[in-house]
Image (cartoon, rainbow, N blue to C red):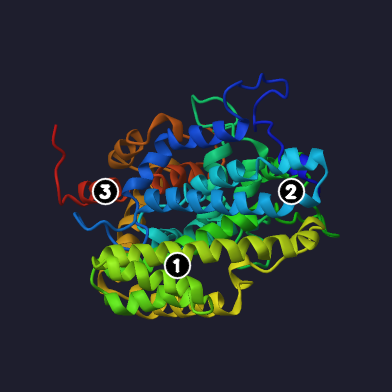
Amino acid sequence: MNWTELTCPQRFGDAPEATPEKHRTDFQRDYDRLIFSAPFRRLQDKTQVFPLPGNKLVHNRLTHSLEVASVGRSLGNMVVRLLTPTLSPAEQQAVAHIPSIVAAACLAHDMGNPPFGHSGEEAIRQYFIDRQAHYRPMLDEWEWADLVRFEGNANALRLLTQQLQGRRSGGFRLSYAVLASIIKYPYPSTAQRKKFGYFKAETSAFELIAQRTGMARDGHGASSRHPLAYLVEAADDICYQIMDIEDAHRLGLLGTEHVLELFRSFMADDGPTLDKIATTMHEVTDPNEQVSYLRAMGIGRLVGDCAIAFVEQLPSIMRGETATPLTQKLSPTALEAMQNIEQIAINQVYKYPKVVEIEIAGYRIMGSLLDAFCAAALNPQNRRDQKVASLLPSQYRCSDGNVYKKILSVLDFVAGMTDDYALKLFRLFQGINLPSL
């Protein structure tokens, strides 16, 4: 792979001779296009981990995505500084765009996730597993795998590239470089992998993205990751691990001294930094501000370590070989601190009753909505089904008779809902609430 192709600025679905804008690079346009979009705004009412708790300032999908983009840009800047002295002038010009490409990809990385956090993905999978006898005979092996292994990652690529009814081709028309950087898992649902990156319906889109960016292929024709996908992944890993702990502190699930020690441990091997921390802590006495300060120091350490790990593995990455995730290649001190945080998050944060409760609610709500809209889209049997079908916005009404495409159109609508809207529709369908004018 080479940086000139990897940073391809051409836009998916756009004419190759499209006139570039004078005042923004193509990748800055990608960032702006995403941040002004309705699907991105809807992330403000999608659960990250904790149910949105009113005046407690914990993260939702939107604030998480903005922070990931910030960390991703910092990672990109550091990588550029490390790489530039080793590159030719042409390569230097190409890699100068890395921070903007990574920041835009980070903004979009969660846009395909359904309501109710990761439990929303699991609820969609379980819905089809539970109704295998009904749906399986209508679908081929690949189509069925897309549904019972539903992935927010693959759904993000679909959201960004598909042409909805009444909309222009190319979806968001993002640059090929940004789209490739979002694809964390460059293989289909039928691959023997834990996760996947594109649905059968987006195969041609994926192939075109891989071709235009020069993503390497193995001996079986499978694509390797775009190198910048490693930076997007690292930015996401850094943010959700660290910020989940800070949110747990704000909600009173973890004590201040415990969290301060967890974050301080990232710098345990750096005496001068620990001295600086001690001086600052003498001045700053507000617990939340202390946690925020040490959180920022910890993120700074992780960004530095991940940038170095990326550059060290870059020769093999550019050959298309699979590399170790950057957050697993940290310095020994930072790696131990990260592993401790992960265990505490798993054992104390993600098992918090309110987190579990919203996961359980997500199963019931998502299953009910899919039942209603799939029946209405596939084979309306009665007046109720016909009325439910009328609630599908026009852009999600599939005129093609293909069952798989109709189900994906329903998933486009349901997965794009906010938590509140999904709950509102569920209550209406159950007769719990009545609509108000």
Could you tell me how far apart the alpha carbons at marks 1 and 3 are, in whole angstroms? 25 Å
From this view, report whether residue 231 is shown above or below residue 169: below
Q: Nearer the viewer, mark 2 or mark 1?
A: 2
Residue at left 19%, top 54%?
54
Callout 3 secondary element: helix
Q: Which x, y percent locates residue 113?
A: 45, 52
Q: Which x, y percent locates residue 86?
A: 80, 52
Q: Nearer the viewer, mark 1 or mark 3?
A: 1
Callout 1 secondary element: helix
Residue that numbered label 1 is attached to: 241
Residue that numbered label 3 is attached to: 420
Residue 84: numbered disc:
2
Tell me the quarter of the picture where residue 194 sits. Answer: bottom right
State the residue in front, 326 or 291: 291
Q: Are marks 3 and 2 in contact (CB under 8 Å)?
A: no
In the rendered view, does 352 fall on the left or right side of 233?
Answer: left
Q: Which x, y percent locates residue 286?
A: 23, 65
Task: Return the disc, 1 or 3, that comes first in the chain's sequence.
Answer: 1
Q: Is residue 144 visible?
A: no
Residue at left 79%, top 62%?
316
Amino acid found under the numbered disc labelled 2 = Thr
